[in-house]
Image (cartoon, grey):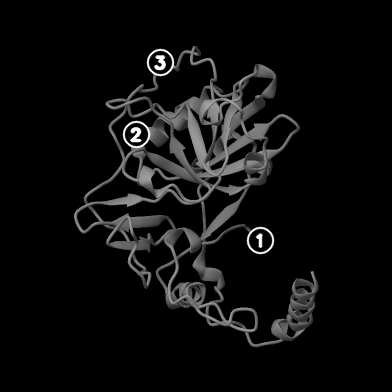
Amino acid sequence: MLKPLLALSALAAAVPALAQTAPSAADAIAADWQPIPDNEMLVMTLQGGHQVYIRLAPHYAPAHVTNIRKLAEAHWWDGTSVYRVQDNYVTQWGDATEKKPLPPSVIANPPAEYEWARFDGVTSLARTDPYATKTSHSADGWPLATDGKASWLTHCYGMVGVARDLAPSTGSGAELYTVIGHAPRHLDRNIALVGRVVEGMQWLSSLPRGGGGLGVYENEAERLPILSVRLASQLPEDERPRFQYRATDNVRFAAWLGERENRKPPFFTVPAGGADICNAQAPIRRAP
């Protein structure tokens, strides 16, 4: 135990000195932070009052996000549950009985929104990705990958996807999951990604793991009840959460990305020379 304790002591001693150094070239300015619209924020309230905030991605999965908005407006998730927690993989929620009817306006199997022809990336990571020829960020911070022909969102930690049955099912959006383990990038282009958990991830990632197949809770008593799911735009004005994404199409974000790819001393002695897209997700913060 001696060496780790010494290392921690040395690091703690270095922190005040680091705090006094000049601001990093990667530091954002106020204009880099842009508001996330109220109708792109989903607020899930769990038993105990804990809240999970999800940013939706209507630009990349418009049909599924339309369904999700309709489900929230219909209060469909109220009284459902978190019913699957698979270690190092995903947490899933919705109707565990699979018997609750969808609102009439919700499309049971919208078009597959797994990939698209355009590429919106404005950044470039240094190393080749094993799942794509290039990874990048959209200007508004979404993690992207491309093979030169199509592009797609990537299954990074905290990303939210639409559970589905076997193809041709595409999932309605009523059953959702978030990644809680090592990025399962093999799911890319096979399932619609519709958003990202931006706050409250601890309430989904620290739950007991399910003992059934694929991490499903075997007993109803194990499920975590969902009290409500609402769009921020459905809430009273003074109760709406205000979040901002960090724009990526500027030199300051490029510098931040460079720092992620080449961590510096005193703790890091060997720079990696690159970063996985999932280890360089664009920051999101509460509005000041």
Residue 192 lies left or right of residue 71; in this view the side is: left
Depth check: give the residue in front, 257 or 139: 257
Residue drawn at 41 percent across, 36 percent down: 65
To which quarter of the image does residue 250 belong? bottom left
**Count of numbered marks:** 3
Secondary element under disc 1, as helix, strand or loop, is loop
Q: Residue furthest left?
A: 149
- In the rendered image, is residue 281 in sight? no
Amino acid beneath label 3: Pro
Residue 44 sits in quarter: top right
Q: Secondary structure at mark 3?
A: loop
Closer to viewer: mark 2 or mark 1: 2
Q: CA distance from mark 1 to mark 3?
A: 40 Å
Residue position for label 1 = 288
Report how far apart the C-alphas of labels 3 and 2 lie in the structure: 15 Å
Q: Is residue 91 left or right of residue 70?
A: right
